[in-house]
Image (spheres, helix red, strand yellow):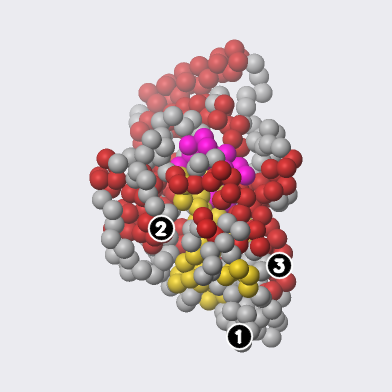
Amino acid sequence: MFPESHNHLRSGCLAALCANAVSRRSVLGAIASLGVSFALPAMSLQAAQRRRAERPMSLVTLFMQGGMSQLETFDPHPGSPAGGQTTAIRTTVPEIQISSLLPRTAEQMHSALLIRSLTSREGDHERGVSYAKTGYRPEQTLKYPSIGAIAARELPDPAVEIPQHVSLAADRWFAVGGYLGNQWDAFRVFDPGNSLANLKANVEDGRQAARLRSLAEADDEFQKRHRFGAPKTLHRKTVDDAVRMMSSEQLNALILDDESDAVRKAYGDSRFGRGCLVARRLVETGVRSIEVTLNGFDTHADNYDGHVTQCNVLDPALATLIQELRERDLLESTIVLCISEFGRTPRINPAGGRDHWPHWFSGLV
């Protein structure tokens, strides 16, 4: 995707998340740390912090897991041997056309940009996902943190009482803290928008407080006997963070009970659609990094029909997320990134599918 020595790009991504009045075009440097094959001069993190906006930036990554085809989405080639059945439609930007499978996204292109020059050095799903989310090729001896984990660790917001790194609808290969520690792994919500089990105490407040006091006493005694330092085990901090989250009104961002039927319908009645709606609510709450996963793009057979199905889920959710962020004056302080671990081959195989193609694919910012 990029040279191995790209720490300046990683700094640029963090700088973009905390800079004041960052242009949407200027986030290209940030995106480079997630898979673009070009380098841009990094913004000084210190200078960006001096220009920190009143509202810190958030990163929303919509991850198309399995290898989304660029030819059926953001870079159609109708009429060419590689084009297949896909046709192109105009967007709100005169020079840009995208797949006819994304009509609602086409109406939001004036608020986005396309990158049609993504490349990767990994053609395996698990390794490709790791590379895309961390900016490093996987190694056996070192597990790298995702950019979301780095942002949550380096740019925390003390006012946010729920996790600042959240993964929605991911069955596997969610964003991790890597060598930063498991405490920076994404907080996973497998079925976003629905009630989360065991997040609230099932007893009245007084009894819950008594239980927590008993737990603290037992923990103190255990620490004394075994001489375990709390900073080393993080046990006490984990309990404190959990209690803080369980008692926070910010948890309501994860529940959609107060959203209208019209809004839910606009995003689409799917796990991914609900995830994008929850992502918008988490951005409003101040959560630093959110990823929403849409699985099912590994179309080695029946590629076109598979992408019809997938785009019926992606299109309303992506378009409505961009529209609502703009209408709520949140788009300029939010990086929305729609990417995959790699693309799919220009050649259509005998099964009507496209195979893995890390050499050239597309993403949307």
Which mark is nearer the camera, 2 or 3? 2
Q: Is residue 31 above or below residue 163?
A: below
Q: Amino acid at mark 2?
A: Arg
Q: Is-magenta flag for residue 54? A: no
Q: Is residue 351 left or right of residue 206?
A: right
Residues 15 and 348: in front is 15
Estimate the spatial distance between the alpha carbons at disc 1 and disc 3, rounded to whole Å: 19 Å
Estimate the spatial distance between the alpha carbons at disc 2 and disc 3, rounded to whole Å: 30 Å
Q: Is residue 265 above or below residue 55?
A: below
Helix, strand or loop status at disc 1 = loop
Q: Amino acid at mark 3?
A: Val
Question: Which residue does the numbered mark 1 point to in the structure image?
Answer: 80
Question: What residue appears at the point 34 percent right and 45 percent down from the top-left corner?
Answer: 19
Mark number, residue 308: 3
Mark number, residue 333: none
Helix, strand or loop status at disc 2 = helix
